[in-house]
Every structure is written in structure tokens, then in C-alpha cells.
Image (spheres, rainbow, N blue to C red):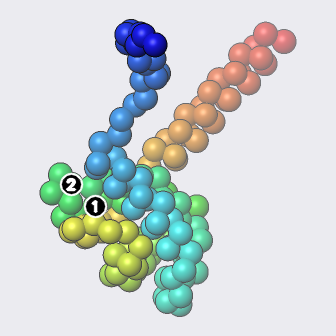
Amino acid sequence: MTQGRRTSRPAARLPTMKHFSRSDRVNEQIHRELSELLRQVKDPRVAHLLPLVTLTGVEVSPDYAHARVFYTCMAPEDRRPEVDRGLRHAAGFLRRELGRRIRIHHLPELHFAFDASVERGTHLSQLIDEAVGSDRRQQE
């Protein structure tokens, strides 16, 4: 019985996948968990405001000490300061509950920041619709 020599073939390469950095994964996990936790706040001073809040993103500092949490709100503009105060008031509870859900060496302090990009996008969309409507009226 002769032993044949196996020729090695190059391993098939898998399609390259985008590798996310640790901070990207932490940002996404904090975003996901906080979105869920916002629905569990029972403090009557802020609970009525939080269903109007949508988290749009999270950016954790390089040392993981701070996390800027971006949000948008469906409440009227004059109620935004109240929403901001409510989020700041709930930050301690949210951070504590976040610590129970995710395992990270340093749990970042949460800082909330209003994200106006959704409003800007809506405004630009309205301007485009108006321009298109104006062009149609002129062509008639």
C-alpha cells in the first residue's frame, strides 16, 4: 500500500466582512439596551415624556468613561427642556440598569444630547416637496 502525498490546496477565502471595533460594538449594545430601558422608567415626573423619545445613536469616549446618547423627540419644541431634564433625571437609573445588563469594565456616565438631524431632514423634505409642487404649478 503506497501512501500518496496530499497536495495542499489554498483554502477558499470567505468574502471579507467588515470588522467592527470594540467601541462600535459597545456603542450599539448601549444604544439597544437604553432604548429598551427607556420604556421601563416608572418615575411619574418623567415617564409620560419618555414614550416621545427615540434614541438615534451613542458615542462612547475612547476611555469608556462617558457616553453621549443622542435622541430625538416628538414633543413640541417648547417641551424639549422638560424632556432634557427628564432624561438627565433618569440617567442614574438608566446607568444602574445598564450595568446589570452589559458587562463592561467601566460603565460610562450618560450624557444626553438632542439630535436635530431628523428635524432638519423633515424640513429639507418639506422644502423639496414645495419646490416640486411649485414647478408643477408653473408647468400647468
Q: Position of residue 4 (x, y in %)?
A: 41, 10
Q: At 29% across and 48% down in the image, what residue appears?
A: 22
Q: Is residue 64 left or right of residue 82?
A: left
Callout 1, which amino acid? Answer: Ala
Q: Position of residue 88 (x, y in %)?
A: 35, 76
Q: Position of residue 13 (x, y in %)?
A: 43, 18
Q: At 30% across and 59% down in the image, what residue appears?
A: 68
Q: Residues within 10 Å of mark 2 (few under 14, many from 20)?
A: some
Please indicate, yes or no, whether residue 113 appears anywhere in the rendered image.
no
Q: Position of residue 100 (x, y in %)?
A: 38, 78
Vertical arrangement, residue 86 with respect to residue 120, above or below = below
Circles 1 and 2 in contact, beta carbons < 8 Å? yes
Q: Circle 2 is placed at which residue position?
A: 61
Residue located farthest toward the left when viewing the structure as drawn: 63
Q: For the C terminus, give its image quadrant.
A: top right
Vertical arrangement, residue 4 with respect to residue 101, above or below = above
Camera-side residue of 87 and 116: 87
Callout 2, which amino acid? Answer: Ser
Q: Which mark is residue 67?
A: 1
Q: At 49% across and 41% down in the image, what residue appears?
A: 120
Q: Is residue 55 left or right of residue 30?
A: right
Camera-side residue of 60 and 117: 60
- What element does badge 2 sit on? loop
Say which quarter of the image contains residue 21.
top left
Q: At 58% across and 41% down in the image, what residue appears?
A: 122
- What element does badge 1 sit on? strand
Nearer-N-terminus badge (1/2): 2
CA separation, marks 1 and 2? 6 Å
Residue located farthest toward the bottom when viewing the structure as drawn: 44
